[in-house]
Amino acid sequence: MIGEPEATTLSRLHESVRVLRERGGFAILGLTVLGLIVVGAIIIPGISPFDVNNQVLTERLNPPGWTNDAGQTHWFGTDSLGRDVFTRAFVGARYSLAISFSAVAGALLIGTIAGLAAGYLGGGFDNVIMRIVDLQLAFPVMLLSLVLVALLGANLFNLVIVFVLTGWPIFARTIRASALTLRQRGFVESARGLGAGRFRIMFRYILPNALGPLIVVATFEVAKVLIFESSLSFLSLGIQPPTPTWGNMMSEGRSILAVAWWVTFFPGIMLVLAAASSNIAGDGINAMVDPQVRRAR
Amino acid sequence: MNRRYVLRRLVHGILILWLVTVTVFMMIHIVPGDPARMMLGDRAREHDVEELRTKLGLDRPLPEQYIVFASGIVVGDFGESIRAQRPVSELVSTALPATLLLLGSSLLLAFTVGIPLGVLAGVHRGGIADKLALVLSLIGQSVAPFWLGLMLISFFSVKLGILPTSGIGGFRHLVLPVLALAPTAMGMVLRVTRVSVIEVMNENYIRTAVSKGMHPITVVWKHCMKNASIPIVTVVGLQIGSLLGGAIVTETVFAWPGIGRLAVNSLIQRDWPVVRTVVLLSAITLVIMNFLIDMTYAAIDKRVKF
């Protein structure tokens, strides 16, 4: 009896490794690229010879790959104040990724608890939660976040709060759907028969079996929030300069697009890369956890 | 169609519409500080703030304010813009055609490219066409429309000088904004088409049609698309909201005089009556849209029973 749970865990692990080997290509590719961007965001600002806000007015608007007299190369060129676009793009990545990851984590947490309780407990509680979800989904997410950020004031904390607020309904819907089917399954009923409490059933029996779709939705949401946050910044309603974000760098680059395309191009291509890699990871994980997609492949 | 389902769905829709009006009304009041002061800025004179407060009715009790707001919605009176000194309804109705033109053209392009590619990918599942189509849809869904717009401007307007950078005018003005906005929707259409085609292709009646010697192309267009089109329209209809989000930024990039740019400019100028109306109207549109989709779905698909 004591050895049994370990054996199950081990065989589960074997199964996961097998699935990962056979169908995990996209998931690994996406997560690797995203991981590289994260690592870059952590270390590049530290090892770069250039300071993020250091203005060198004699070295303004130099093209990508330009090397100054000291032999230092600006890989992504310099902007209209002579700052290094490469360093700024990776400092910007810190903000964009931190906001996106924490907002999705918060939305996942709140959405999971609300949706799990709604799906398992049902009744009036379910009704109230789902009406709130319906109400929120009536508003275009982009417009709602724009207005909320403008009203509350744009700082790191408020941005995360707003994206948690606008993001949780999709998680609530996803897990509620799983909970509705799982609650009638044999193992849940037997657990209930053996006297397991509500919380134990929800978090020990239903949640572990509903994780797959949640993770998939979370990876897609990371991509969405990255784009939303950059859009807000671009509209100068996000984090304010001189703190660099991908969005406000592109906004600054917009006015000098004709003479220095690189100031806009590089932050944007990093955004595309980050969003695409989380979308690929989402697709890949979906292919691993969803038996229907497995068949369709 | 089940009459009880329609009735229940209608009551639900009206409830959500009412909650939408309450939410939009409350938005300005949950923010700490004085709304009138926020709209005019810190440097405004106390006299002006007082005047605006009286003008917007902010000095009245909340329930009274809500009743004025809600009865305004019913008769199409959304108050007056603080900056433009014109009725909000006038500003919105002037901006609406431009947004509809942009959204409509983008959706049209998304469908004309996305559906054939999606069918091709679904029919040749796992083949090269499928993989290329998936990559295309992935890029479409990962590119921020405003960045794509800037890159298009930089190439077609600045470098080649063949298309205008901004503003509204003839067909030439429409090209770049549509090219910037359409890929998001195109990626979505492609994916949904592909999945529905794959699902339908597994159905028995398709196998029957193929085995009785019907030409594959006829099978796809006559049998398959007829059944795959329901989910495509549904999913795209549900995504109108996210398309609207992309339009907000795209309009700003191209100085396109639509609802999105109106919303952003009003937000920056703290012109709350205008912002509130744009939010309200887009939410109302989405709720009505959702209702219509559900109704069509229930009418077409006999399996939907509640």
Image: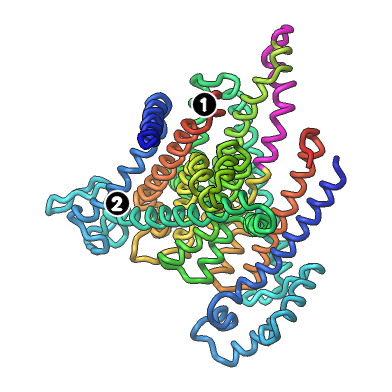
Judging by the rendered image, the residue that carries numbered circle 2 is A41
Q: Which mark is residue B207?
A: none
Task: Please say if A103 is above or below B153.
Answer: below
Q: Mark 2 or 1 closer to N-term?
A: 2
Residue A186 lies left or right of residue A220; in this view the side is right
* Range of magenta residues: B211-236
Element class at badge 1? helix
- Give the residue type at disc 2: Ala
Q: Is residue A123 visible?
A: yes
> Is B98 in front, or is A217?
A217
Q: Is residue A291 left or right of residue B279?
A: left
Q: Looking at the rendering, which quadrant does residue A33 occupy?
A: top left
**Residue A97 coordinates in the image, percent (x, y):** 38, 53
Chain of the residue under the numbered disc 2 shown in the image: A
Percent position of residue B250, x then y: 55, 52
When asked about the image quadrant of residue B283, the answer is: bottom right
- B226 in the magenta segment: yes
Q: Quadrant of the N terminus of chain A?
A: top left
Please state the horizontal and vertical placement of residue A40, each as a whole percent of the image: 27, 48
Chain of the residue on which disc 1 is drawn: A
Neighbour class for label 2 at 10 Å: few (<14), some, many (≥20)? Answer: many
Expressed as whole percent of the image width and height from the top left, the position of residue B110 reads: 61, 38
In the picture, the disc for residue A294 is 1
Q: Is residue A24 magenta?
A: no
Q: Kindly identify the residue that appears in the image at 20 percent across and 57 percent down.
A: A50
